[in-house]
Amino acid sequence: MVDAGPSELQVRAQRARAIAGESPIVAIALAALTFALQIRLHAYSADFGQDEASHYISSLAIHDYLRSNIGSSPLAFLKSFHAHYPLVGIGHWGPFYYGVAAVWMLVFSTTLASVMALSATVTTVTAFFILSLSRKVSGRWPALCAAFAFILAPLVERGSGRLMLDIPITLMCLAALYAYARYLREGLLRHSIAFALVASAAMLIKGNAGCLAFVPPLSILFARRWDLLRRPSFWAPLLIIALLVGPWYLLTFKLVAAGFRYTWGLEYVATAIVANSRFLWDSLGPAILGASALGFFDTMARSWRGQDVSVLTVACALGVADWTFQCVVPAAIQDRYLAPLLPPLLLLAGNGIVAVARWSSQHLAVRVKAMLALLLVLGVVPAAMAVPPKASLGFVTMAPQLFRSLPDNNRTVLIVTNGRGEAAGLAALAMYDPNRPSIFAVRGSRLLGGGGYNNSEYRPRFQTIPEVMAAIDAYSIPLVLYHPNFPDSAAWAHVNQVEDASHLYAARWQQVEETPSLGAPIILFRLPENAAKPQPVGHLLALSAPKRLPAEVSANVETP
C-alpha cells in the first residue's frame, strides 16, 4: 500500500504552526533593530525638532485635557494651553494621532523616553504588518527582507527616531491596503466600511493620506473588477469619508494651504518627480526598486490573467496613488512624505524575488529567494548607517534648572533663539513643567519678531535696543532663555538685539544658569526688577492668542 503522505490541509496546518512559533521571535528582532537604531540616533536624549515639538505639545494638550479637564470646553482649554505653550498644531494637522499619543501618555508617561517608545512601537508594528502580508503572497524570505528593509530605510529610521506623523500614516495606509484587498477579493460591505474607517483615521492625521482616495478606482482598474462599480458597497467609502473627514478639511483647509511651499503646475510636477525619485533611490536603493518594478509588472500580468493577487494589486494601486499625490500636490518636497509608499514597494519587491525564483529549478527556488532577500536587505544597510544622529541642543538639560529659578508670583519665560531652538525650548519646558500649564512660555518670534506663515516673511518688530527692552518690560518678563541662532535654521535679527540688550542694560541682566549647546551655551538670564512685578496674565494671554497681529502686540509697548 502506497503512503499518500500528508494532505494539503495538513501541510497548511504545519506551516501555520511554524509561522505562529516563529512570529514572536521575528517581532522581538524587529523591535530590537528599531530600538537599536533609535539609540544610535540619540533619540532618547536629544531635543525635539520643530515639527516634533509641535506634535509633542499638541499631544500633551489632549493628554492634560483628558487627565484633569475633561468635561470643560475642549476649544477653550486648547486656547488656554496654546497661550502657555504656543506651539499647538491641531488644525494644521489632524487630531487623530495626537489622541493616540495622549492615551499612550496616560498609560505610560509624558517623558521623552515614553514618546520615543511610541514611535518605536509604531515602526515595529508596521514592519510586522508588512511581514505578515508579504509572507502570505511571497513566502518567508521575501517577507523577512521586506520587514527588515522597511526599518533600515533611512527615511523610516529618521521617522522612528522622532515623534512624527509620517510612520503612523504609513501604518494606517497599510491597514487600508489590507482592508481594500479583502474587499477586492470578497466584495463584502464590511471590508469596504473597514477601508473607509481606516482611511478616515489616516486623513485625520495628516493631509497626505488623501492619496487613499485614489486607491479604490486604481484597484478596480488594475484588477479589471468592473462588476464592483455596480455595487453600493463600492461607493460606501465615499459617503463615509465625506461625513467623517469632510467637515474637518473644510474647516482647516485655509490653514493647511497656507503652509504649501510651492504652487500648482507642471513646473512643480517636474521638480517633485526628480526629487522624489532621488529620495526613493537613497532610501531603498536600486536593487529593491528594481525588484519592485519587476513585482509590479508580474502582478499586473497575473491579475489580468484572472489570478487572485488582491493584496499585490492594491499595493500597486497604493504605490501609484501615493507617488502621484506627492508629485502633484504642492505642499512640500521631503523624503519622509514618501513613507506610505515604502510598504507597497516592499511587498512588490517580495513578489519580484518570487518572480526571479520561478525561473530557477524547483529544488533551488527557496535558496534563490533566501539569497536574493539577504542581498536586498544588505543593500540598505550602508544608507541606514549613514543617517546622522539627532542634535542635542541642551534644552532638555536646561529645563529642570529653569523651573528652580522661576519666581513664584511671575512664572514667565521668554525664549530667544531662532526657530530650531525656540521649538525645542518650548517642548522641553512643557515636558518638565510640574503643574502644567503653570508658566507662560513666550516665543521671541512672537514678541520681538515674526511675519508670515511659520515666520516665512520674518522681520524684527523693533528697530532699537531700548524698544526691545521696553517690550520685555511691558510683559514683566523675569527670565530669558537665550541662545544665538542655531545652524540649519534662518537667523533672526531679534536674537542679536536681545544679546545687545543684555550688554547695554548689563546691571539689569543676571546670568543664573548655563548649559552646553551647539556653537555656544544656552544661557538663562534673570531680570530682578521684572521678577518682583506681578504677572500680567491678560496681556500674556492676548500675546499668544491665535492670529494675533503684530501691530496689536506693539500697541502694548511703551518705549521709555
Image: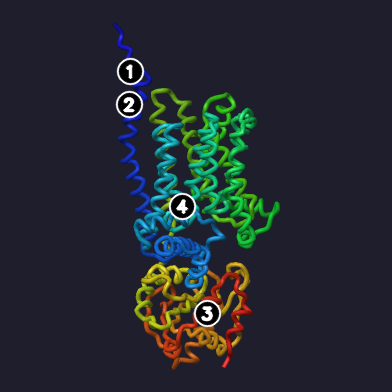
Q: Nearer the viewer, residue 227 or 401?
A: 227
Tell whether 336 sits left or right of 408: right
Residue lying at 40% horizontally and 26% vertically, measured from the top left: 364
Q: Quadrant of residue 25?
A: top left
Going from N to C along the chain, the mark reached first, 3 or 2, is: 2
Going from N to C along the chain, the mark reached first, 2 or 4, is: 2
Rounded to the nearest angstrom, the CA distance separating label 4 from label 1 is 45 Å
Residue lying at 63% horizontally and 59% vertically, measured from the top left: 260
Q: Nearer the viewer, residue 255 or 142?
A: 255
The residue singled out by tag 1 in the image is 6
Tell me the tag on residue 14. 2
Tell us which disc is closer to us: 4 or 1.
Answer: 1
* Residue 83, percent from left and from top: 51, 72
Tell whether 115 sits left or right of 194: left
Rounded to the nearest angstrom, the CA distance separating label 2 from label 1 is 10 Å
Q: Amino acid at mark 1?
A: Pro
Q: Amino acid at mark 3?
A: Gly
Going from N to C along the chain, the mark reached first, 2 or 1, is: 1
Tell whether 472 sits left or right of 390: right
Q: Mark 1: few, some, or many residues within 10 Å (few <14, many ≥20)?
A: few
The residue singled out by tag 3 in the image is 538
Q: Nearer the viewer, residue 453 or 557?
A: 557
The residue singled out by tag 4 in the image is 154
Q: Amino acid at mark 4?
A: Pro
Tell us which disc is closer to us: 2 or 4.
Answer: 2
